[in-house]
């Protein structure tokens, strides 16, 4: 039996490196290489991640590629 000082957190289950993608840099991601699924679905997921981090994400679709940049509010 072992007593813990804090309740352990779950390991990240995300497929994508959101901490890196939400660092404020401008990222260009390609479907099939950088993310799976549809580009618009990935854009929606990036908006949700930005909101969780207290910001917004600027996005642009260039053909099927996604360009994004996180911005703090």
Image (spheres, rainbow, N blue to C red):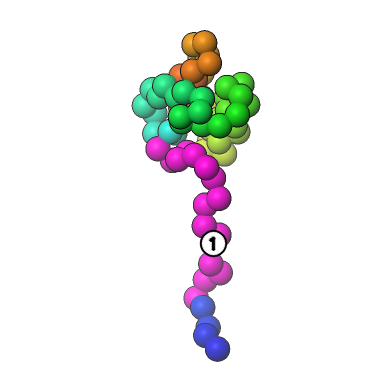
Residue at the extreme front of the image, as rendered? 32
Q: Position of residue 29 (x, y in %)?
A: 45, 24
In the image, 65 versus 18, the foreground residue is 65
Q: Is residue 11 magenta?
A: yes
In the image, 38 versus 42, the foreground residue is 38
To which quarter of the image does residue 25 belong? top left
Q: Position of residue 61 (x, y in %)?
A: 52, 14
38 w.r.t. 4: above or below? above
Q: Is residue 44 left or right of residue 31?
A: right
Q: Is residue 9 magenta?
A: yes
61 w.r.t. 47: above or below? above
* Residue 48 seen by the camera: yes
Q: Is residue 23 left or right of residue 57?
A: left
Q: Is residue 39 left or right of residue 18?
A: right
The quadrant of the rendering that contains the N terminus is bottom right
Segment tinted magenta in the rendering:
5-20
């Amino acid at each position: 039996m072992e007593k813990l000082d804090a309740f352990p957190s779950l390991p990240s289950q995300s497929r994508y490196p959101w901490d890196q993608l939400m660092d404020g840099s401008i990222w260009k991601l390609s479907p099939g290489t950088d993310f799976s699924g549809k580009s618009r679905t990935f854009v929606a997921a990036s908006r949700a991640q930005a909101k969780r981090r207290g910001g917004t994400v600027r996005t642009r679709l260039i053909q099927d590629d996604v360009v994004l940049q996180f911005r703090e509010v």
